[in-house]
Amino acid sequence: MPSGGDAVARGKPSWPARGAAALLALAAIGGCGSGSVPGTTAPPGASASAAPGTATANPTAADALSGYFSALDAHDAAAARGYLSPEFLRGFGSPAAFDGWVANYLSLRDLGVRAPQAPAATTAGQFPGYRDLVVYPVSYQAVVKQPSANEVTGRLERFVLLGRTSPSGPWLVLDVATSP
């Protein structure tokens, strides 16, 4: 999270599955399917017609994931915030703190997105009001300006939890963790 993963240092829990996972912010990963990042692959199930940045542009979780990564790849923190659940964004403390977190990343390369997974059975109770939860495993090579406990230069793996509030609602990033 902001300032080098303060939430982890305070011991703030993330959604559990197969052990305890500390809540971590997702590094600003390169644009899925945008063709701008070497080795980038679109998430399985992404719609070819989705235009990032609008609620109707993410009819699938894969579209939301792709739009979020594309916004981060462009260092467009405002657009990236549009893909976050209000609860996850609050974890940064403020929109300005999220913007600073995005700006800390110099580059992200070789994004890989694997097939989605079902979250742990206990996860749904931690996200009241959200449904259709899905986890996407992602990996990438990051370079940061100021390394910290959770924001480092190197190959990283994260698990992105997405959900929505209704069958026709937009998919949102609910959490990001180091284990499923």
Image (cartoon, rainbow, N blue to C red):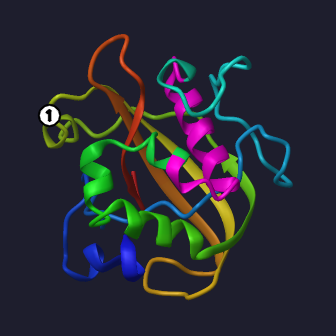
Position above or below: 4 against 138 = below
Residue 162 lies, in percent from the top left, at 40, 36
Q: Quadrant of residue 90?
A: bottom left
Q: Quadrant of the N terminus?
A: bottom left
Position above or below: 35 against 88 = above
Kind of residue sitting beneath label 1? Pro
**Residues shaded magenta:** 58-78
Residue 79 lies, in percent from the top left, at 54, 45
Crowd rating for badge 1 (residues with CA inside 10 Å; few <14, some 14–19, many 20+): few
Q: Residue furthest top?
A: 168
Position above or below: 31 against 66 = below
Check residue 32 for magenta coloring. Answer: no
* Residue under label 1: 128
Check residue 73 for magenta coloring. Answer: yes
Which one is in front, 86 or 40? 86
Q: Secondary structure at mark 1?
A: loop
Q: Can residue 179 be seen at all in this image of the molecule?
A: yes
- Residue drawn at x 62%, y 37% is 66
- Residue drawn at x 30%, y 79% is 6
Which one is in front, 29 or 122? 29
